Amino acid sequence: MPIKPDQLAALMREVETEDPIDFGDLPFEEEELRKLVALHLCEMAGAMENFSTDDKLMTLLAVSAKLVLENLVLNVQRLRRDGVPVSESVDSLLKRMRKPG
């Protein structure tokens, strides 16, 4: 892939200015986590070097969708654990997801 891990980490920092990540009290340095993730993603992209453009796009969309879903689940679990009521839109989404079929 043409992007290097340090370039991807810089782009991540740029995106975070609009949508900051709450690292809380994790026992890790934010920049080290960012660099680790950027390196991992660049390695994943490199492993897809021989994929068709459509296959690369589908793979990246699948990975992104999984991460967004995981983030949603973790945030709702955290809110529930902390006894924070969820917004009406989140509550509506959860109700739709609970309905069978």
Image (cartoon, rainbow, N blue to C red):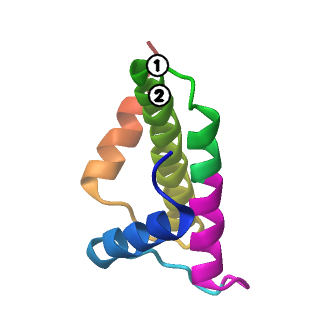
Q: Which residue of the protein is positioned furthest toward the top in this rendering?
A: 101
Residue at 63% across / 73% down in the picture? Answer: 33
Q: Distance between the residues labelled 2 and 1?
A: 6 Å
- Residue placed most toward the observer, 70 or 31: 31
The secondary structure making up most of the magenta span is helix
Examine the structure image and report whether residue 99 is included in the region drawn in magenta.
no
Q: Name the residue under label 2.
A: 56
Placement of the C terminus among the 4 image quadrants = top left
Q: Position of residue 66 (x, y in %)?
A: 53, 39
Residue at 55% across / 79% down in the picture? Answer: 23
- The reply, left or right, for residue 40 in relation to residue 49 is right
Q: Neighbour class for label 2 at 10 Å: few (<14), some, many (≥20)?
A: some
On screen, residue 92 above or below 74: above
Residue at 63% across / 60% down in the picture? Answer: 39
* Foreground: disc 2 or disc 1: 1
Q: Where is residue 75 in the image (x, y as percent from the top left)?
A: 50, 60
Q: Find the magenta span and give its range.
A: 26-40
Q: What element carries label 1?
A: loop
Examine the structure image and report whether residue 31 is included in the region drawn in magenta.
yes
- The reply, left or right, for residue 89 in relation to residue 56 is left
Q: Neighbour class for label 1 at 10 Å: few (<14), some, many (≥20)?
A: few
Q: Give, as a three-letter code, the residue at label 1.
A: Ser
Q: Which residue of the protein is positioned furthest toward the right in this rendering?
A: 27
Q: Do the residues labelled 2 and 1 touch (CB within 8 Å)?
A: yes
Q: How many marks?
A: 2
For residue 13, what is the image quadrant?
bottom left
